[in-house]
Image (spheres, coloured by chain):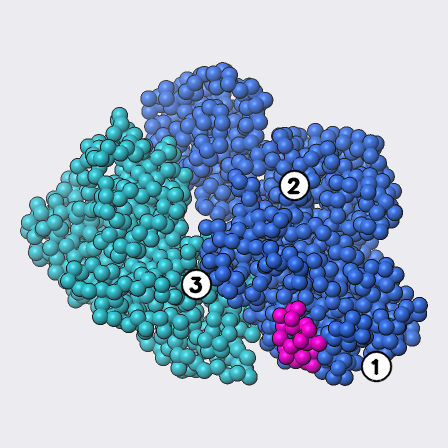
Chain colours: A cyan, B blue
Amino acid sequence: MEQLGFLYDTTRCVGCKACQVACKEKNKLGTGDFFRRVDTMFDATSGKKVHFSGACNHCKDPACVAVCPTGAMYIAADGTVQHNDELCVGCGRCVHHCPYGAPSLNKVTGYAQKCDSCAALRQAGQDPVCVAACPTRALRFGPLKEFQGEKGVVPSDTLSFLPPAARTSPSFLLRRKTDTPPVSAGGASCGSPAVQPHKEYGAFRRDTDQRFLILGGGVAAVSAAKAIRARNATAAIRMVSCEDRLPYCRPMLSKGLLGSFSEDRYPVVSLQWLEENNIALTLGRTVSTLDSAAHTVTLDDGTKIPFDKCIYALGARCFVPPISGHEKVGVFTLRCDTDLRAIRRQMLTASHAAVIGGGITGLELAWELKKAGLHVTVLEMAPVLMGRLLDEQSSQYLRRCIEAAGVDVVTGVQIKALEGGSAVESILLEDGRVFPAELVVLSTGFRANIDVAAQAGLNVGRAITVTAAMETSCPDIYACGDCTDRSMSTWMQSVRQGETAGANAAGDTLEFHAEPEPAMVHTAGISLLSIGDMGKHPDKVYRLVYAAAQEDAGRFAVNPKAVQRQGTYYALCFHDDHMVGATLIGDLGSMLLIQDAVRQQWSEAQFFEAAERKGIMIHAQ
Amino acid sequence: MPSDILKDWLRCSWFTQFFSDFPAWCSTAKQAPLFAKPWHELLSSRDSACLQQEYDDLMKGTNAEIYIPLWASVCKFEDGSLLDETTLKVVQFYHRWGYAPVEMDGNPPDYIGQQTRFLCYLYACALHEAERGGDTAPYLAAAEEFTTLYLLDTVRVIARELRRFAASELFSTVADALVALVRRDGSECLAAEKPEVYAKLLECYDSYRLGRGREIADGRQTVIRTGGRNNCGGKCAIRATAQDGCILHVETGCDIGLPQLRACVRGRGYRKTYLSGQRLRYPMKRIGKRGEGRFQRISWQEAADLIASEWVRIRDAYGPGSRYVNYGLGVNAVIRPDMLVKRLLNQDGGYLGFYGSYSFACAQFVTPYIYGDAFSGNSVEDLPNTRLLILWGHNPSETVYSPQGNYFIAQAKERGAKVIVIDPRESDTVIAIADQWVPIKPSTDGALAAAMAYVIWSEGLQDQHFMDMYCLGFDASHMPDGVPEELNYHDYLFGRLDGVEKTPAWAESITGVPAAVIEELAREYATTKPACLLPGLGNQRIGNGEQTVRAMAMLACLTGNVGIPGGSAAGMGFGREEPVPVFPLGQSGYPGVISCFLWTKAIEEGSKMTRLKDGVQGMEQLESDVKLVFNLAGNALINQHADINHSIRVLEDTSKCEFLVCSDVFMTPSAKFADLLLPAPSFLEDDNIAAPWRLGHYLLRNNKVIAPIFGCRTEYDWLSDVAKRLGLWEAWSEGRETQQEWLEHLYHELRQKNSELPDYETFCRNGGHTYKNAVSYIAYADQIRDPEHYKFGTPSGKIEIFSKRLYDMNNPKEIPAIPAYVPCPEGPDDPLRETYPLQLIGWHTKRRCHSIHDNNPWMEEVEPQRMWMHPDDARTRGISTGDIAEVYNDRGLLRIPVIVTPRVIKGVVAIPEGAWYTPGKDGIDTRGSINVLTSTRPTPLAKGNPQHTNLVEVRRYF
């Protein structure tokens, strides 16, 4: 099969953006979502401004496929990179790793989404819609070999702001004027792509007739099930979930779902997938006891399930601080789908809402409530928002953004009581201040579900003690996800822990080592990304550098979130002139640059040089 | 608690009536005690007329300040549009359960009333089933699912907005009741299998006495070929996919045009623009002050009565010349709404007509003074023949002057043509295709042209043969009789008249273009053949735009580029291509005609307007002020006309213009000023035929994709009603009941002239026709090839560089007889610059067609409404990118976010035209509508609009 890809003729593109909107119309993308986007950029190679229409480049060695934990991102038979919603867990790894910024997370469903080069249209013998839309015929799609023979065709990285082609071998060529032969910035030749086979998922295989019992229905449980099935085609796998619906994307609970609920795209695995993979799923049952010696589990209806290997993934529950009145009607926590539905209905009658706790979930939820038309106050016990993650100035900047969007923020509070009759009406602080609220959400952290484990005799502290292989202190029992002591409560870590637990239970050898993942918050119409150490180690001396991106300087990002009026804000944290942490607020288009800089510990000069090379105009302040 | 559930159910059944037919709802108000408060208490505070008005304001869009979306499609997702996929899913949900939507005041089937009625239907089915001892669970589960997926979102949004806007307790109660309805868990219904509940419910749902209806099959997807009809250069061919009355997507995929006609960014967003929930819904009469945006819903019959009576009253009181049809090209097709009403006025004594255009007033007016006609443009497919393309104030990347134009320019470039763009902005065209950008101060193009001519002549690069052969007035030996010889153009250039030589150095000080660049540009243009100097229209929308047009045409002659392939005569640039169907307006009984730009003057003091002073045509002085205005499918009443604050002052005085009829698809800034506001269908709901402005060998069919939504009616339909009341229907319609019949008739007429056209049915089915035997038009090729037989249409039969007609006007300061550079009012030389140092221009952005699409969120992504400002100008004012600036002059003040960029020259700020005037609470525009700052002073000759010459000052606001 010949490699298919895009040919983009920079000499013909007039920057009219017809492709951008045609793509949105065809793919029914919401405002703020793009598969293809046109920007005006500065190309350092030619020293000129250029229009650039960018989308997924269907790389031969795609970073998104390499990092996708579930195989949702895959290379299709025709060589294009495709995405399977049913397998997607919305972890966002592809979003972080694609050097072209092509995938993004759908605001409603939470799944990754990107250009599929209009596979359905192509199957019907038509061009992708962007190609068919182009008034000047600047875009074409077809076998790359044919394009390579044409006059003036050069590799993509001859545009200075695109990454070296060798990195992912994009199926993306440019046509430029022939009289000024451009020099390839990345030094790669499109004729001999360096194809590196990406790591096959689940290379280990051992088919047995073992019984795998997975306790829990969250993403760690699902990931474990997938990891087992990928290594063992014949074993019996059963999952037990206390919720009454298919596993779903939990981080999305605090995002768009509160506003517009789409049940059909809600679950992360479908019934069909469960059937095809022969995975049994018991819904709506809680685990009463686990007998580690007898290798059995008893459910709340008395059912006894024997197992050979057990994976304990019962997750965590919301911590409810002992505030007086927390049991009143209208007081919620947000952990599961039922909580969301309850909040959605309560939202209809409430005019004032309060979110107690200004962490990621709290801030996102506050914004959703605000969008729904409520008057929202965030009450945070600490003196600043997200103080454990952010430096003080970034935290204040975030607070200003949130307040500018109309959400009230009060920090350093001590809550005395939730007042009202049977239903909550207001919040009383220790200092006597009162905030009206007919809807209160407690977003004050989680506690691991360890009761069953403790009773079964597993080693537990605040959470279940596990090894890097996700083994508990009992043989044949593994644990993963939010209930373990290695959890940082992020979605991605749960995926990887689940994978590790499942793989090891199936006989493979995998280890989980926590590495810093970027934390992302979407609130108040802005996005925040923070990675690494923002100056939180008391013994180290840090230097913080603040910078801003000039909005008009051109930016390349297929999926920038709404940009604040001020443009994009950067806080860079250096230790011995090595970047150890960074925070980005506004347009996350340059998040890859930030991640590279932190992971490779660049110097300040290195960072600004690299930014300029990429056409991202950042100015230190 | 069964009794609570009974209440809820009855409330539920009330909603369906409440949201569809308020009077009927009121008549059943005896059931009102079921509300929290007795019905009479709710009503007592306000009389029923007052309540009816509030109901219409909240539910029918009669108040410009209130907008409550009532449809699942718009409520479910932040940017849903009417009749989209969500609507289809709702309809299919209905279908699965055997429910057929009933008519509810033209509302889409996912309307809140329909949704609650469906819910009630499901409950009725459940009870029916329960009585027979069947299984109620599926119905209750369906009700729960439907509520979760669609109704909850709809209710949430409606309740929120109702609470925000409702003044009376009644409507707050409605919000509460709606919320109570969806908050209740459907499974509770199981406990309520009481016969009396069942009986009550069935009373409301008589037709479902027999239980669940049969499952309804979903409709089939159909693809309809249609075409855009905005005031865009070339229109575009559209394929719309529809199912069950919903429009799923629009795309280009027809085979109209060679090369295939492809929609630009605006055409791609049609569905998003036109199926917005903010559409006008019902005919409305103004209540409150004019311009306030408060209306009362009336019936179409009342609307027709009102028009007919005002029509007669004003005609009899002030004469036919008091009636005016304002410029409006929102529908730019073969049958336009303004044409229909003009035809009707012509059956009844006529009306005050207009000439000119907001687009090309000067170019259209003055080009005949040069060439004898305005057909000075070559066919667009001739572009690849050129070797040098000078886009002078022309920005095809963004304006998409012709949908094929950018394609042919790309071809020209591929064949090696050099492209030079002259523009104060480094436009997207500059970035895309220019080999050279020549930035210039706005309104000084005439000086640049003069200096280029000076260089060409000084260096002997002129096409002397061409000048001698075809032109008049360029030097002393080629002057018309009876005119002093020294007034020739050459002597002007070399300073024999005023002692000033028009050297590049002279021009540099005026235009800001370095002398060396001017010399180079002149040499390049004179020595490259063929060279195409393609003027845009922006450079003639200035205080004396006529001179700019003449100067460029002069250059085209001086270099001999007229009448040849790959060349360009500049000027207006109309082409003679395929004939288009012409809707007959009939003969006007009133001879007076004014410039379209002077309508506010005609309202203020029309009877004082004269031929000499105001360019009145057809008579020496008008007989009357304008008293009756029809503004159909146009936004030039407020938004697109100059000096918005002035227009508001003129219109607010209802003793001046006494009756103002608007029809439109949205509550535009102009529509707010209507006395009678009529909702029109969008192009997706109407039929028409559309042709490109002037470039392109095709004709487009605008096919109806869905029926008109809400109470929208075409102008033809309501004008028929008016015509019947006036006894003019027979004459006006020639017996044709519908616009469709006219279109067919006009098409047949055209087909007789051009047999290549297919039969009407085929034409409609294909969405248009591409002419196979098209001939490319090269302007004045005949005159150049064979001057003996073909004369130019001027009095002399030659190209008139010197115009004796203009000379005879005897106003040499403003209207010189030659294309001399005349400094423009509010140009860079105006002393007013001491107060207002910045020149303000308003470019056409790609995201809008004038003011159309401004309310489309996808277009805001394409290009947010921002002002461009040079870094030096910004620095001295302490402004940086993202700041909100106040831009002001003596005429007004607006606020707009700023982009600081070297892509606009120093001393110039640029605000894209067309943004909807949106005054905040303090009356100051918050959207950046440039016409707050523009001037109503007309150009000297064409009486055209000077909307790019404005002096302003800018300060930081926030």
| For residue B623, side relative to residue A551 (left or right) | right
Q: How far across and down, in percent of the image, does residue B504 sit?
A: 68, 76
Depth order, front residue of A525/A478: A525
* Chain letter behind tag 2: B
Badge 2: few (under 14), some or many (20 or more) residues near its Cα, within 10 Å?
some
Residue shown at the point (70%, 33%) measured from the top left: B654
Q: How far across and down, in percent of the image, does residue B172 sit?
A: 45, 27
Residue A165 visible from this viewpoint:
yes
Asked if labels 1 and 3 share a chain, the reply is no
Residue position for label 1: B465
Asked if labels 3 and 2 share a chain, the reply is no
* Chain letter behind tag 1: B
Three-letter residue code for mark 3: Gln
Asked if labels 1 and 2 share a chain, the reply is yes
SS majority, magenta: helix
The disc placed on residue B648 is 2
